[in-house]
Structures are given as structure tokens and as C-alpha cells.
Image (cartoon, rainbow, N blue to C red):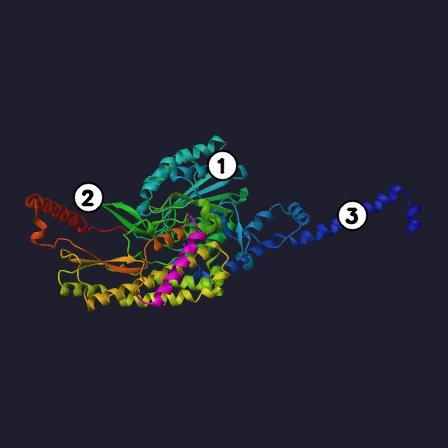
Amino acid sequence: MSKTMRDMSAWGISLAVNLSILAIFHFIVYESGKQLDTTDITSIVDDQMQEEELRFNETATDQIGTDGVGATMSPSLQSATQVGQQETPAQEAIEEILNPELNMLKALSVVPAEADLAQKVEVKGTGEQVGGVEGALDRVAFEIRNSLKDRKTIVFWVFDASGSLDDRREAVAKRFDNVYKQVGELGSTDALYTVIASYGEKAKLHTPEPLQDITKLSKIVREEIETDTSGKEYVFAASKLVLEKFQNWHRSKGPWNKLVFIVTDERGDDAPQYLESVITLGKRTNTRFFTIGNAAIFGQQKGYVKHVYEDGFEEFLAVDQGPESAFPDAVQLPFIGSGPDWKINQMSASYGPYALTRLCAETGGMYLITAETRGYNFDRSIMRRYAPDYRPARVQEQEIAKSGAKSALVNVAKMTYRNNAPVPELTFRAYNDNILRADIGEAQRPVAEIDYQLKRYYDTISVGVKQRDDLREARWQAAFDLAMGRVMAMRVRYYGYNQMLAQMKVAPKNFENEKSNMWRLVPSSDILTGPEMRKAAVSAKDYLKQVIDDHPGTPWAMLAERELSMDLGWSWKEYSEPIPGSDGMLRANQEEVARLLLAEEERETMRRAQVTKKRKRPNL
């Protein structure tokens, strides 16, 4: 061989080498062409779609958040997506040359593997605080402009038709022209089409064909969307409907970008049935979802919106606005010994509700928070570390089941959702011993049931103590320690409360001041109910202090501070107040006092009449 090569001329050697390379490439092209036959690809897509539908039907009930179904948004976490066979750059380049439509077909056939779904991947923006509807619509214009730079675009506006959203729909309608004007300033809008739909208990399409005439859009929103009074918000079913109807629209003219903008103030009622199928459909149709919505209520299912009746009476009505996680992870317990603080139960942890946020994250969109909660809010730079898990609920459920600490927390949180512990009575009339004993007896009635519930809470959460140190996520650590500390603190308080009442009922205390006629139980640092409760009090404080030290500036730290602000023991404090109907109420300037009392009574009567007036509460 070496002699022959030496005898060959330079051009002969070159010819042999090039022929060899061409033969190799011919073989590669031939094999790739066989693998990329269009019929085979269609078959693969159809098989994957059937497999995904089957898997969705089998696991639909797993996609449930807290007891039925998920403010400043900043974290950018979502479930792992976009997985499949890993190909080398050379293979991808050859495939693109042979079949330019392959990339589109790949995008439509992506089905995540279970192992990849179980991983968290940080991506661009699952949510953002945008500063009201105006800020949200500026972001909408930005997203539409960027989409048009890439290719032709269809925009779907999906409006919540419930009464609680009347003002927001009007605000969006007012700015429609401005949104499309911003888009047009940077180029032509000839490649932009718009669809408008609304939903309540049923979905309604207001544009049978996509529109290009932007002058009609605001009129459609104002005049054609009728307020839905069912109290149902089937947002995911509506999203599925519009995507299925237009997924093949003008397919012959090439691929289109699709942007869905959901406008709502609630979480939606049909996530368990449709969330995962809508996510799958969104990926297959190259659709990105955005939600213009409210922040979720931390650890709560219900938020409150102000409703004004026709007679001008205002009332805050409950709507479904949370929570931000797929499973409950916050215990619902009252704060005993301090005044009510409604902001505690209406605060935001800086996230949107789980299901809508997951939909936006999985499809590459964003949850745009237009309204904070009326309660406390927290720094989003701090809350970034405490992002909820946006993977599928079924994947989370499997992990929770394997963790003693996580399963204990979720179980006790569910129990507190179902059984709300009432705040005990702390003041007692002592006009005489019989009245005192009667008041104490009335206050003791619910205590036995509450004590039983608290024991069950403690037994449930304490199962996870041994695996507490295995928790790695800051959110789970904070939630578990807070739950443990609060449940233990509550047990100490209620046990002591019951003991103090029992002792007073058997042997009523004497007043030191002869004018006193009332007793009040006030928090005390003295634990008078035995060594077991004193030990439990120390342990409860340790858990709560750890939450404050490890998670400053978070909702968990605020709740722990609130719990620690009240001592766990009790003591009796005497005081006096006028006895209703007695002469003591009309001393000194009797006529003036009487006049003021009558005026106040009259105002209170009018207020009660207004509150108790029969009105038909709307379903929001």
C-alpha cells in the first residue's frame, strides 16, 4: 500500500480522499432521510398525544391544590420541561437541512419525562410585580412587540366575566388602543391578529375569527361580555377551548406565535380537571400564557373584594385567591390574647396562585401581579428564596409521601383548614358568683373540643420531627418550624386557659378593689399548669425563635413574632365597668351621659339595620 501511494501523483491522492468523504456524507444523508420521513414523525406525534391524554386522564385528580385546589412576584422557578432525545449539533444541522419543518414538529411533540418533571429549573420569569393594570398592559405591549419580531402572532384575550372583575375589564378596555399603538410604533401590525373570549361557568368566544381591526376590541370588551353570576370561574376549560379552536388557523401560511393573556382576580375552579392538558396543548401549539391577576393570599384559600350594593352599602365578600402552593403548608390557628389583625389573614407571600402561575411558567410566560393583597406584603428580593414548587402536583405528592416532615406538615395544615379553632372568651362578669360561674361554664363548652383538636394537631406534626433536619428547601423548613411552634404554643395556652377557668369556677377569687366587678384573663409569663406544659412552652419558643432567626423578613417570621409577642401562661386581672341598667351608668352629668348613650344606641341600631338588611349577595 505504501509503495502504491508513493507512486500516485498528488492529484490522485486528493481525489481518493475527497471521494471517501463524499461517500461517508452520502451514507449519513441517506440514513437521516429515512429517519425523518414525514409520515413517521406524524405517527410519533399522534402516539405521544394519545399517551399524554391517557396519562392526564389517569392523574387528573392529582392536580389538586389545598383542599380542593393553588405580591410581589419575583421568583423565576418552574417545572422542568422541553426534554427528549439529545442530539449532537452536527445531527441537528443535517436534520434542519433535510426537513426545515422538523423544528416545529419537535416543538409540538414534546412530552416531558417523569424524571425531568421532578427537577426544578430556573427560567426567565414565572411572575412579576408590574404596578397595576397600566403596568401590566405595558408589559403586554412589550411581549407582543417581541413576538412580532419573530413571526406572525395571534393574541388571545381571555376575560374573567365575574362581577368582581368589572372594574379591571373596564380598565383594560380603556387601554386597548394604547397597547396596540405601542406595538405599532415599532413596526407594522399587519401580522397581528386578536381573539377575545370570556368565561364564567361557560366559555364564550366573542370573535369567531381573529381580528386585525383594533378599533373593535374595546367595544367588544365593554358591550359583549356579560357579567357571569354563577360564582364559577372555569378559566382552564376556556383556555383549552380557544387553543383547540385556533390551533390549525392559517397553518398553510407557516408557523404562528400565540400569546394568551388571562385577565382575572381569582385562581380558577377547574385546575384539577384541565391544568395539565392545557399546559401540554400550549407547548404543542407554541403558545405562551400570561395572567394579569392578583397576588395569592398566603396560606389561605379566600381573599376579599369590596362590593358596593345598589343602596350604597359596602361589604367585603370572599373570593378564591389562593394559596400559592399546590398543597397546604400553613396551619390556620388564631392568635389568643391579642386584638384581631385582619391583615395577618390577608397578607401575601409575593406569589400568584399555584395553578395559573404554573401554567404561565411552563409555557414560558409570566404571572403579572396587578394588585397586592390588602394585608401585609413582603420584599420580593427576600421572598425569591421561598418560591413555591411549580412542578406537577402528582410529582410533588410523591415526594411529600416519602418525607415524614413534609407529609406531617401537609396533613396538619389540612386538618386546620377543616377545623377552625375559635378564639376563647377572656372577660367574665363577676357581679356575683352565680353570674361568674355561668359565664365560665359557657366559655368552657368549646374548650374540650378544641383541646381534642390540638392534641390531634400535635400528634400529627410531631411525627415529622425526626426527619425535620432532612428538609433542604427554605420554604419547607420555615413552614415546618412555624407549624410545630404554633401548635405547641396553642396547646400550652388552651390547657392553661381551661385550668384557670376550672379553678375560678370551683373557688372564685376575691377582688382586691371593692369597686371591681369583672375578671379578665391576660397573658402571663408564669406557666401554672405543671412541668409538662412548662417544658412544652420552652420547646415552642425555641421553634418560633429559630423561624425568626433563620427566615427574617418573611411571613413565617412575622407570624412567629406575633406568637411570641404574647406570653403562654395566664393570670387573672380585675377591673370594673358599669353594670347595664344600673344607676352607676348615670352619675355626674346624668342628662349629658343619657343623651350620648341614646345617640350612640340609635346609631348602633341604624348600623345593625343596615348590616342585617336582606340583600342578595352576588356570586363573585
Residue 422 coordinates in the image, percent (x, y): 27, 60
Within-10-Å neighbours for mark 3: few <14, some 14–19, many 20+:
few
Image coordinates for residue 612, horizontal then vertical, percent = 18, 52
The image shows a total of numbered marks equal to 3
Residue 40, relative to residue 246: is it above or below? below
Left or right, 486 with respect to 289, comes to left
Q: Which residue is mark 1?
A: 145
* Horizontal arrangement in the rendering, residue 103 relative to residue 612 (left or right): right
How many angstroms separate mark 2 from mark 1 (CA)?
45 Å
**Which of marks 1 and 2 precedes in the sequence?**
1
The answer to whether marks 3 and 1 mark residues whose Cβ atoms lie closer than 8 Å is no
Return the residue nearer the eye: 328 or 468. 468
**Mark 3 vs mark 1: which is more N-terminal?**
3
Q: Amino acid at mark 3?
A: Ile
Count residues near mark 1 (Cα–Cα under 10 Å), then give few for <14, some for 14-19, many for 20+. many
Q: Does 149 sit above or below residue 235? A: above
Describe the element under mark 3 as helix, strand or loop: helix
Q: Which mark is residue 21?
A: 3
Amino acid type assigned to the residue bearing label 2 in the image: Asp
Label 2 sits on residue = 311
Could you say where residue 186 lies in the image, as x and y percent from the top left? 50, 31
Would residue 22 be found to the left or right of residue 307 on screen?
A: right
Residue type at the position of mark 1: Arg
Comparing 329 with 24, the one in front is 329
Which mark's residue is nearer the viewer, 2 or 1? 2
For this rendering, which residue is in front, 288 or 472? Answer: 472
515 and 222: which one is in front? 515
Q: Residue furthest front?
A: 512
Q: Sequence-wise, which precedes: disc 2 or disc 3? A: 3
- First to last magenta residue range: 529-553
